Image (cartoon, grey):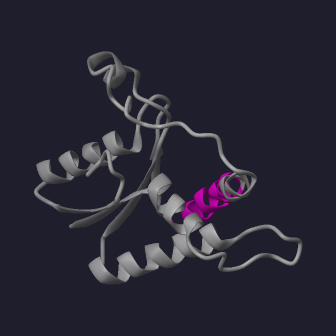
Amino acid sequence: MIVLAVDGNNQMFASNSSTWLARKSDGFATHAIIGFLRSLRYYAKEFIPDMIIVVWDGGKSKVRMELCPEYKANRIVKERTPEEQLVYDALITQTPIVKEMLGHLGVYQFQGFGIEGDDLLALVAQTTAKRKDKCVIVSNDTDFL
């Protein structure tokens, strides 16, 4: 069995950061939706998985922050320009649509309050390995790498 495990937030961000692929006639951005689904289709064709799982961030891990207070301490939080805020807002409005579409496509999704997507990917990979199955992880998140 092959499990395709996708870092949903990371893939949405990458798709949102690409060229503005399309907009509905009312101005609603759809580029992250289209980019996410195109990427998912590519990975599904490339790896031919028996199961697809998309994990979503549920916020910073309190346990990890207690164990390692310097975790993410090097992150520079900067104020967004108005243009950057528009791009971010477009991402936020498209994410629920992608989640709904994935549900209709039969893709499993996991998210937990205070659990980062990286940790959920690790859990999927460990569970898959225990069953002697293969797991393909899709993420280019710096923390995860």
93 is higher (above) or lower (below) than 73: below
Residue 39 pos. (x, y %):
46, 75
23 or 119, nearer to the observer: 23
Question: Along the horizontal axis of the image, is 20 left or right of 10?
Answer: right
From the viewer's perspective, is 26 left or right of 113?
A: right
Residue 44 on image: x %, y %: 37, 77
Note whether 110 is above or below 22 in the view shown.
above
Q: Nearer the viewer, residue 72 or 66?
A: 72
Q: Which residues are magenta?
A: 90-106
* Main SS class of the magenta portion in the image: helix
Q: Residue at x 26, y 45 (%)?
A: 122
Query: Could you say where residue 97 lies in the image, as x and y percent from the top left?
Result: 67, 60
Q: Residue at x 33, y 16 (%)?
A: 66
Q: Judge whether 91 appears above or below 22 on screen.
A: above
Query: Among all residues in the image, which is located at the extreme right?
Result: 26
Residue name at image x 45 percent, y 46 percent: 110
